Image: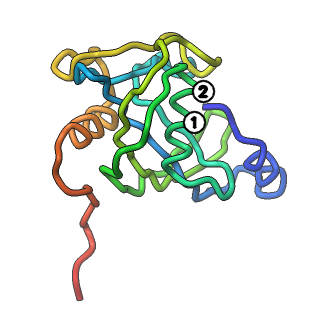
Amino acid sequence: MATPEFIRTIRASAGHQLLWLPGVTAVVFDDEGRVLLGRRSDTGEWSVIGGIPDPGEQPAVCAVREVYEETAVHCVAERVVLVQALEEHTYPNGDTVQFMDITIRCRATGGEARVNDDESLEVGWFPVDELPAGLPDFAVARVKQAQSDGPTWFENSVQVL
């Protein structure tokens, strides 16, 4: 994912130390029930679409924007399906981040899926029972949760006192 300018500004002062950041994942389904995936240019892995909201940007707006920027697909956000603090991650350059991920189920409304920026090597629609081999558990879990009509999933590892 491209580094937003506001994070570059923070990094100029913070160096490589841990940044706690919002993240948005969009799980997009078409009218046939297929899910939209992109093969990332940084890792070569297939994944769901996602990104970092701009300052003040609403999560649903971010989801719709990221989907279009990365795939040229127009969509509408339908509902929040998952909220989770992810594990700390250190990039090859030493920058350390931890994301609070908000996953949103979206419905495609138009556009033809294609690579629309430099963040993806390819994009495509996949039946949920034929996801690409090697799709990370992170992405599989989000597709499964978005496919259900169950309540929003929260990691509940906190003991009630």
Pointer 1 local density, CA inside 10 Å: few below 14, some 14–19, many at least 20: many
Label 1: which secondary element: helix
Using residue 130 as the reference point, say whether residue 63 is left or right of it: right
89 or 68: nearer the viewer: 68
- The answer to whether residue 15 is above or below residue 75 is below
Q: Which mark is residue 122?
A: none
Q: Write down the residue under mark 1.
A: 65
Gap in Å between the C-alphas at discs 2 and 1? 6 Å
User: What residue lies at 40% left-to-right and 30% top-to-bottom?
Assistant: 48
Circle 2 sits on which residue?
Answer: 69
User: What type is the residue that disc 2 sits on?
Assistant: Glu
**Above-or-below relation of 54 to 51:** below
Residue 152 horizontal side relative to residue 11, left or right: left
Residue 116 place in picture, x, y as percent: 60, 16
Tag 2–tag 1 contact (CB < 8 Å):
yes
Check the image and report above or below for 6 versus 68. Answer: below
Of residues 9 and 92, the one nearer the viewer is 9
Q: Does residue 87 sit above or below 70 in this rendering?
A: below
In the image, what residue occupies the spot 51% across and 37% down?
64
SS for callout 2: helix
Please name the amino acid that badge 1 sits on: Arg
- Give percent across and percent down for residue 21: 58, 55
Give the colouring mode of the picture: rainbow
Give x and y (percent) for residue 144: 21, 37
Q: Please tell me how crowded label 2 is: few (under 14), some (14-19), or many (20+) other residues with Cα within 10 Å.
A: some
Residue displayed at 25% across by 67% down:
157
The residue located at (34%, 49%) in the rendering is 79
